[in-house]
Image (cartoon, rainbow, N blue to C red):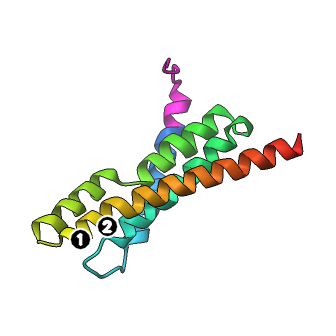
Amino acid sequence: MKTPRLSLMDICYIGLGGMLGSLLRSWVGFGFEGDFPVPTMLVNILGACALAVLHATQHRIHAQGRYLYMVGFCGSFTTVSLFSYETLQLAQNGAFLQALLNILVPVICALALTVWIISRLDRREEASQ
């Protein structure tokens, strides 16, 4: 797959989306107390759903909008590095079932919701043509 050449404006859109996604990601975790990393799981599932919607409708979005939302926002909103760290922490603390659930629940939910969203939007698109 050929990587597109990015202009300075494209890079600015990615940066703006990244800033907004990371701010929202931080906000989701504020005030949460508990041993299980629910905020990380939630943002990874929501981020996958948002990316699925954007992917299914990308033909309606200008290229710079795709950079803003898909690359910048979704890329910084979802947190695989924090997900990995929290899973390791759970395992190191002996919470093996929670560590396993932290791996399986968001992955299964994100995949299932992505397939469901894209298929629904594709059917809606086909029906409108």
Left or right, 9 with reference to 124: left
Looking at this view, is 23 or 119 the one in front? 119
Snapshot quadrant of residue 83: bottom left
Residue visible at 49% across and 52% down in the picture: 111
The residues bearing labels 2 and 1 have C-alpha atoms spaced at a distance of 6 Å
Residue assigned mark 1: 97
Please state the horizontal and vertical placement of residue 103, each as a whole percent of the image: 31, 59
Left or right, 93 with reference to 118: left
Mark 1: give few (<14), some (14-19) or many (20+) Cα within 10 Å. few
Residue visible at 50% across and 49% down in the picture: 73
Mark carried by residue 101: 2
Would residue 23 be seen by someone viewing this image from the given angle? no
Please state the horizontal and vertical placement of residue 28, each as a whole percent of the image: 43, 70
Mark carried by residue 7: none
Vertical position of residue 106 compared to residue 128: above or below: below
Left or right, 62 with reference to 5: right
- Residues marked 2 and 1 touching at CB (< 8 Å): yes
Highlighted range, magenta: 1-12
Would residue 67 be seen by someone viewing this image from the given angle? yes
Q: Is residue 11 magenta?
A: yes
Q: Is residue 38 magenta?
A: no
Q: Which amino acid does label 1 sit on?
A: Leu
